[in-house]
Structure formats: C-alpha cells, structure tokens
Amino acid sequence: MAQTTLDDWTRDPVDPEIRAHVYSLITALGGIGDNGTYALGDDALVCLKDLRKWLKFADGQLNRRDVARCMAEANLVRGDLLEILAKVSPRVLEQPLKHKLAVATLELLVPLTWPFEIDPVEATVNHHRHGPYVQLAQIGYKRAILQFDRDRTLQTAVKVALPSMAIPLRERSPRDEGIIRIALYFIRNIAMLSPPSSVPMDIDEAEVSRSTTIDTFQEQDIFQVLLSMSSSIGEDFVAQDVVLLEILFFLLKGIDAERLFLEDKKLGSRNANELKDLMQKEKAMLAGYARTAPTRHNRFGTMIWLKQEDEKVTTVSGQDVLGKAQATLDKMDQTKKWNKPRRPGRKTDLEQEKEEFDLPVALSTSARTHIKAFVEEFLDSSFNPLFQHLRKAIERETERVETRHSRQFFYLVSWFLRAECARRRTIKEKAADPKSPAVLTAEDESYGLIAEVTNQETFILLNRFMQKSQDEKAWQDLNAGMKCFTQILLTVHEMSESGLEDDQEIAENIQNRIFYEESTHDRVVVILRSYRDQGFGYLDAVTELSHVFLRMLERYAKQNVDMQIKSKRRARKIKKKQAQADGAEGEDEGHISENEDLQQAQKTVTERKFDFNRFAAKFVNQSSVNTFVAFTRYFADLDTEQLKRAHRFFHRVAYKMELGVLLCRVDIIQLFNKMMKGPRGLDQESPAYREWDDFVRHFFRQVVKRVQERPELIVEMLFSKIPQTLYFLEHGHDREVLTRAPRPPAELEVKPGMERPEQIGVAVGVLVNQQKSDALHWVRDVLTSSAEERKAWEDAEQARKELAAAEAPEGEAAPESAETEAPTPPSILVKHDTADRKIAMFKDNKLRLLMTLVGFMRLGANDDPDASWVIPSSLTSTELQEAIDLIRKFEFDPPIYEDGKAPEDLLRSKAAAARRSTRRADFDDDSDGIDHDSEEDRGEYALDDPTARKPDGERRKLKRRRRVHTPVELDDGEREAKAEARRKKEIEKQAKTKSTMFVHDSDDEEWDADKDAAFFAREQALREDTLKQFKKSLVLGTVEPAVSKKELSRKRKAEDTTKKSKRRKSPPKRKAGPFDDSDDDDENAGDAASVSSRALSEEIEAVLSDVESEDEATDTPLSSQHAGSKDDVPHTSAAATPSKTQDVTMADDDDDDDDTPVVRRPAARHMRAGFVIDSDSE
C-alpha cells in the first residue's frame, strides 16, 4: 500500500507489541549504578536468553527485522552487552556464572553483528525498510567494539572459548564446539563488516577501516589465536577450518602482497613515483582542458549550426567548437545521450560487494607492519596444514563447506603464493647487497612452505573448479580460479630458476603436468574468447592468465622439442579417419551398437606431438582481439605491466602471426590513434609510450599498404572479421572448399552356405538387435504396397489375355506373334518416408542388405547418396508376398544359430571377401600356390587344419632375391603365367597323394548298372595286368617292368644330357677302400649302383637259388655256399643289370668327375636256406 499521507510517513515501522517486549527485556537486563559502573539485573542471564529467543523467532522464523531494529534503537550493544563483557572479563575463567553470562552475551552479539544480507527470493518489505538502518547500526557496533576503552572485547571472546579449546578433540562436547564456533564467528563478523557503499555514514571511516581492524587484532592477540588454531588444524580443530578461511579472506583481500614486503626505502620511492605519476596525469588533463577552456574575453554564449548532407541542421553550443571541425564533431559526440537499457540481472547484491577482492585497500604503516609479521609467521607454520585440510574438505564436499568457500580458498592461495614470491625476492636482494648482513640459507631457497598447493591434487581441484565456474557462468568464482592458476604458473617459473636442483626438478614436473593436458589449453582459450563485460577485475585476470600461460608455454615448448600432450578425441571420429586413410572398411564395422560406440568414444585418450604455432593460432581470432581491445580502452588507468601485456598481444597478432587484418577495424584504429595523438591520450612520459608509438606507426603503414592492395578493406573496416573474410583479404579470392562426396558404407553379405530365406532371417535379426524396428516396418510396408500394385497389374494382364482369347473365333487359338514379347510389369520406385530414412538408405549397410535380399535394386553409382531404389519387373507379387511373410516370421520368431552365435556374426564385408579371392592367385615365389583361405572343404587331408594360426597382422609378401647373373627380366604377364603353372602342378601333386579330397560317398549318387559294370571290368583288367607283371618280375629277378635295350639306351642318353646341363655340384669322390670291388666291367658300367637296388637284386638271386636247390641241399660248409650260388645262376645277375643301371648315377669324363658321388657297393651277405646270416664280428 502506497504511503501518501503525513501520518503514513510518521507511522512506527516496528510492531508496537514487539517493541514493548524487547524494551522491557533490555530494561531488566541492567544499567548504570550509583557508583557509575554497570550493574547487572537480578535475572540478567534469563533476559539475555529471552532476547536471543526473540531475535531468533521474530527475525529468523518470521523473516522480520523488527527485533534487530529495536535493539539498535535501544543501544543494546554499546550500552549493555559490551559493559557486561567488561564486567565479567577479569574473572570469566574462574566463576562459572560469569562464564555463562559471557557465553550468553556472545550468543546475542554474533547474530547482531552478522552482516546484513537481502535475499532476493525471500526478501520482504521489512528487509528493505529496516536494511539501511541495520547496516549503519552494525558499523556502529564494529566501531564500538574496536574503540571500547574499558575492555578488550575480542580478547574476552577468546577467553570465553579457551576452556573449550583446552579439551582434547575427542573429549569435547557439542556445547564446547559451539562455544569455539561462536567466538570465531564473532571475530569473523568484526573482520567482515565494512562501510556500505549505498548508505551515507556520519562517522569517520578510518575508525572502522582495515588498518584499524588489523591494529586491534594485533593489540588483542587475535593473530596469535589464528596462528595457533591454523597450525593445529586437523589435530585439535576440524570444523573450524572454514571459519578461519573466512577470517583470513576478509583480512587480506585487496591488500597488495608485493607492496607488503617492500623495504621502507623502496616503498617510499614507489609511493613518490605514484604520486608523481598522478600529478603528471592531472597536469596533462588540465593542459588539454586549458586549450579549449573559456577565458575572460570569450565567456559569452556561442551557438553554431552544422548543416548535413540531407539538409538537416544540428546546433552545437560553446566557443570551444569554433577552432576545428574535429572539435565540433567531438563536442557533438559528447552531447549525445543514450539511455542504455539496464539489465535487471546485472545489479550486484550485497554479498558480491562483500566478496569483491579486486578493489585495492590502503594500509597505514603500523597495520602494514603488523600484517606483514602475521603473514610471515603464517607462511612458516600454518599455511600447509590449513590449506591441505581445506582442500580435502572441499574435495569431499562436506556440509560446512559452502559455495563461497571455494572462491575464498583459491583467492587466498594466489595471495599467499604472491606474498611468498615477494618475500623471496626481498630476501635475495638483501643477501645480494654487500652492505647487508643477511645471508641466504637453504631454508630461504626451498619452496617446501607452499608445497601443499603445488601438488597434483590441487591442480585437479583447480581445473574442476574453473570448468564448473565457466559452465555455470559464475564469473567471480572463475576470477578467483584464474588468479590462482596465474600465480601458480609464476611461482613454478621462479622455482625453475632456483639454485636448488630439487626445486628445478619439481618445477619441471609441475610444468609437464600442467601443459600435458590439452583440456587446460582449450580452457584458457575459451575463457579469453568469452569475455562479455564482466568487469575490469575479471578482464585484468583474463588477460594476465592468457599472457602468462602463452609465454610460459612457448618457453617450455622451445626447451622440450618433443613435447607430447594428452588429447581427447571421439573414438568414432578416429576410427573413421583411419578407415578413410586406409581406404577400406573393416569386416566387423557397424556391428557395435550406437550406445556402446558412444561409451567407447568418451574413453578414448591419445597422445600427440605439441605444435606451439598451432596452439597460438587459437588465441588469434576476433573474440580474443575484442577482449584485449576492451582491456586497452582503460589505458589511462593501466600501469606499465598491463600496458606491456596488451602491447605484446597486439604485436603477436600483427607481426608474429601476420594477421594484422584482424586489427583493421574502425574502432581499433581510432583507439590507437587516440592513445598516441589524443585528446587525453597516453602520457608521453610513460615507460610504455615508446613501444606503443613504434607499434602504432608501423601498423598504420601496414594498413595503408593493405588498403592499396585490397580496396575492399575499407568496407570491411566497419565489421568484425570472420575466417572467410580474413582469407579473402589476405589472398584476394575466396577459399576453395573441396566438398568430398559422401562415402558409401561397406557392403555386407551373409556368409555362404545359407539359403535365401535364412539370409533374410539374418538381416532381420541384425536390425531387430540394433533396435531398428521402424526401418523393418518401413521395408515391410513398401513390400506390401508393391505387392498389391504388382498383383493388380498381373490381374489386369491376365484379364487382357482372357479378353483377347474370347474375341478370337471359336476353334482357333489366339494369334501370337513371335516377334512381340510378353509385356513386363513396370518397375516400382521405392520412396522414403522421412529425411532420416533417405540418409539410412545410403549409410545403413544393414538396411541395404535387407533391401537387396528381398529383391530391391539400386540404380546409380555406389557413392551417389541420391540414387534411387526400385523393385524390378522380374519380381512377381507372389515373390514379394513371400518376402513379407519371411520378414514377419523372423521379426517375431528370430532363428537360433549354432554355438550361440548372433546374427551379426554371420555377416561379412563384400570388399574383404573380394580381397581374399584376389589373394588366392597373388602369391609370391616362395609360396606353395595353394589358397589356404578358401572355403572349400578338403576333408581329413586339408592343410594345417584345425591348428592353422592366422597371422597377427597383414602378411608381408616375401619376394625371392633375384640373382645377379639373371640375364632376362620377366614381365608381369610371364611371371603370372609361371605362377599359375606352379600352382596347377602343386594341385596335381596333392591330388595324387591326398585322394580323400575328391572321394565322395557313393550312396549320395544315383545307381547306374552300366557304370558299375565298366568300373568292375577296369578293376579286373588292372588286377590281371598286375599279376602278370609280378610273375615276370619273379623270372627276371626284379619288381620293375622289363625294358628293351633300345629303350634303355635312349633313356641313358636322356639322363646324360640332363646331368650335363644341370652342372650340379656334389661332394668329392670317396677313395676306394680295401673292401671295394675292382672289376673292370663294373667300372665301365658306372660302378655306382645304389645300395637299395643292389641289395634287392642279391636277395632275389639268393631266394631263387635256394628254391631250385631245396631238394638237393647238402651239408656244404657256410663259406662255400655263397660262392656256389653265384656260379650256379650267372643269368640272374646279367638279367638284373638293366634294373641296376636305372638307379645308377652316370659320371662324365669332364670336370664334373670330382663332383659325382661314388656309391659304395654293399658287402656280400652270407645266406643259407634263403636266410641271410651275418656275423657280428664283420
């Protein structure tokens, strides 16, 4: 309800009933006695508890601020609570009643000093009505606590908690933990309270400033309490880590850590230089204003009008517009007003204002000394334990850890790392000074004091925090993460320059871990590109991070030439790229389901060599340039380091990467010109002015040259540059984009040995397993409509024939011309129902297999995605209906295959099968000429089956090394012909020995009496011929057939000719031994018969002699029987001579005599009664 009357304005904003109860409790609490000291009421403890209940009930549960305002108006804190603490402080540890009073007072002070926050979701009218008053009251509470002269209030709060702190951690009760927590929160509130920017104050800000707070903490020994608890965290204290974190954050935020550790002389010099710079800026500003400032002679009003091209007139007032036309235009621009629409979500609330850490804070000399001593002691004793415990708590996401604690944690890590680096530089400068007695020790060189924030766990937590902040667009959190990451990089860089080898190795390992992750590189690039007016502090952190990261990465890449980074890529993309490079598709491609493929894609991690130029190119785009341009617009407020940072980036863009076209934009050129030429440009006394002047001068020359070469650049200066525009402005023509035709999938087929219905069942089963039932239904619907259409055509054709037969005269057949063919039904075009179906008809090889099996025909090239599918004329309606029935059958009743095989296991690639068939004839000279991959069943004599082992990789084709003296080189045709001949010869050879490959079961063939009779006749003739040969061999003394002299001589001549042409080398001729036969006839005949043939002849000879003389056997001595047998049958050895000579290797009289082996004649055997008798002594 709107307040419109004076009575409404004078109405009490607090509920009178609440005010009456609160005031009565405050009155009963106590007051100033007769002696001028504070006197407690009889029920002071009960009144304190009641006040706390009212505060908790009315302001907490009812979400009102009436009680807090009543207490502020009644001056409860300054007039009662601080007096009670001062009264009980001396004996608070001795008397339990006073301890209870102190605890009750702290329980009331903590919610009263808790920083006032307005929740935009739960805020009511009372929050906005009482908010400014309560905020000013809290600043008054802080001033009263810090300036209270009768007692040290903060020290008293610590005294109250000392008995609970002294109890071991495991023996503490929840009440003890609550008392410790209350004391710490009270200290946190005092450090956290700061003057609000939206409410004017009537007190001196110096009384509640950061310097005053630090001095009070030092005076009341609060720093010692913080150091003791931080060093004992994890042992004596656990849940207090986040409270200590908040106290440190609100004490140190905004303080310049580097300035903190400067010596007094250098600090004074720096302050003097800063004052000089400010005065120089003021002088330059006044000089620029004085050029157009009014004087005593031109104070009269002036107004001019400017006529534009479209006959419009614009008026400009003031005598400062009379000088130059450019000044007139600048004045016009200054007088323009644009009511920029305000975004409701951009307003910062009180919490963000409290958490702001980019605003610098000035400290007094005493406060700087106190905080410097505290920071040094904290780094030496408490940094590692506290931040290790906090990191683990944040990782576990414990209940006490809130969202703001992660931001505070990473900001403090960056702050303390920066302080440690500044302290080390100061120590080194003192040690390097010959006048200083300071000596650099090993402890000063070591970086062990900050080891807990430079380990892998911290990097993982930081990367996760930065990524989460970026995804959730929590820019303040991301700002803290970037500051921490930048400071870690700078600290690691200083570690690499340390004099200790251990620190150098640690720095090398840290850099390797940081730069190994490609995701870190990409995150830095994305953060730089995604700046969208998040404030100057965020902009400064973004540009500093990109500058430091890029320069350190460049230096590290130069030192490690073979640097590898871990790159995450989708497995599916990698597989496709490899398949495109090989030009072939695997046999099992497509068998994995889409879900499994996506799961595997997320897990694929590869390593690749790092290319710095490729990475630096990611930084150079229009978004990155816009970020640094926005940063450079603050050139009047930037220091030397920040100006150099922007200069390095623009120099890299324009000259190192040679992409100065990105800077050819009107606003960027105008910014550079303003920085150099003004008005209100860069100070010429600035150390960075010369570098910027050289860069801008060379860049403007480059712009003029580019405009002369590419006049189109004048138009493009109005716009940002996209990659296509960049390429056109660089080369003068558009980039030629080569559109590659889509690659068709691998054609599949069902493995041989299955009938067409079974093949359709396999294709249907694959589609069902891959959850593509919609494609199956579409094929079935197309077949159904096509079958109906084909059936209608067949019925019409049948009716036409019957009509023609009926029109013909009776008794005569319908005239049929031999020349006219029977009409064929038209082909039916297969139409897709959706765009996805059209893509699947080209890319889904399983669907294409089913369409091919049911009779569909594809028209057009194989790689044409717009090719049509038709149902050919050859398919009848009956065949189409059979296909429909088969699909329905196998869809709801899928077949079961042997060995538990899936339908996918019965598919294979046509290309792979074609390559195998091609390899059958493509074998090298060392191969056996047999296709081992053939599907033909060779029976029990098949080669190396079933133990044949497939090669692990592609079989390397072996080639026989060609001899040097080969006179003629065969071409491919002759070589293939020879290979084919060898292959046929080998197959014939195997056919003779491995007959079971060609033996078939006679039961499977039809019975034919004539064939059987002919077969038995041939077998009978073969047996008779074999019997004759056996009888003849018994007579001749050999098992070989008899050979005529003419045939024998012709055969010998052929063998002699063959042996002379081969010129084979053989072992040297063995010398004749004492037991060798020296018969002249044997020497002329060759005398080199084989052992087997000679022994066989002698055995047959002995058997025949024993048979003839069996009845006339006498007791002839053994020594004379062998001689007698040889003399009695001279024709046997003569008749056996031709058979012996067949196995004799003939020797020539030329140089090959030495190479021909001499076969030793076997010794004569002693025989008796047809048995050979050998003596062991021979």
Image (cartoon, rainbow, N blue to C red):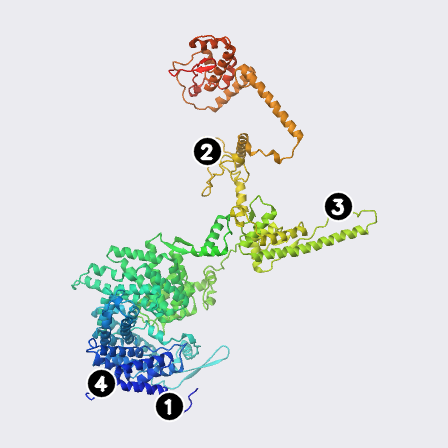
Q: Residues within 10 Å of mark 1 (few under 14, many from 20)?
A: few
Of the residues under marks 2 and 4, which one precedes in the sequence?
A: 4
Q: Are marks 3 and 1 in contact (CB under 8 Å)?
A: no
* Disc 4 target residue: 39
Mark 3 against mark 4, which lies toward the viewer? 4
Q: Are marks 3 and 2 in contact (CB under 8 Å)?
A: no
Q: Are marks 2 and 4 in contact (CB under 8 Å)?
A: no
* Disc 2 target residue: 962
| Amino acid type indicated by mark 4 | Ala
Helix, strand or loop at label 1? It is: helix
* On screen, residue 1072 above or below 298: above
Q: Are marks 1 and 2 in contact (CB under 8 Å)?
A: no
| Amino acid type indicated by mark 1 | Thr
Helix, strand or loop at label 2? It is: loop
Q: Position of residue 901 (x, y in %)?
A: 52, 48
Give the Cα separation between the discs numbered 3 and 4: 134 Å
- The mark found on residue 819 in the picture is 3
Mark 3 against mark 1, which lies toward the viewer? 1
Q: Position of residue 490 (x, y in %)?
A: 30, 62
Q: Nearer the viewer, residue 223 or 999?
A: 999
Of the residues under marks 3 and 1, which one precedes in the sequence?
A: 1
Q: Nearer the viewer, residue 7 or 1114?
A: 1114
Q: Position of residue 99 (x, y in %)?
A: 23, 77
Give the Cα separation between the discs numbered 1 and 2: 117 Å
Mark 1 against mark 4, which lies toward the viewer? 4
Q: Among all residues in the image, which is located at the extreme bottom? A: 6
Looking at the image, can residue 646 be seen? no
* Disc 1 target residue: 10
Of the residues under marks 3 and 2, which one precedes in the sequence?
A: 3
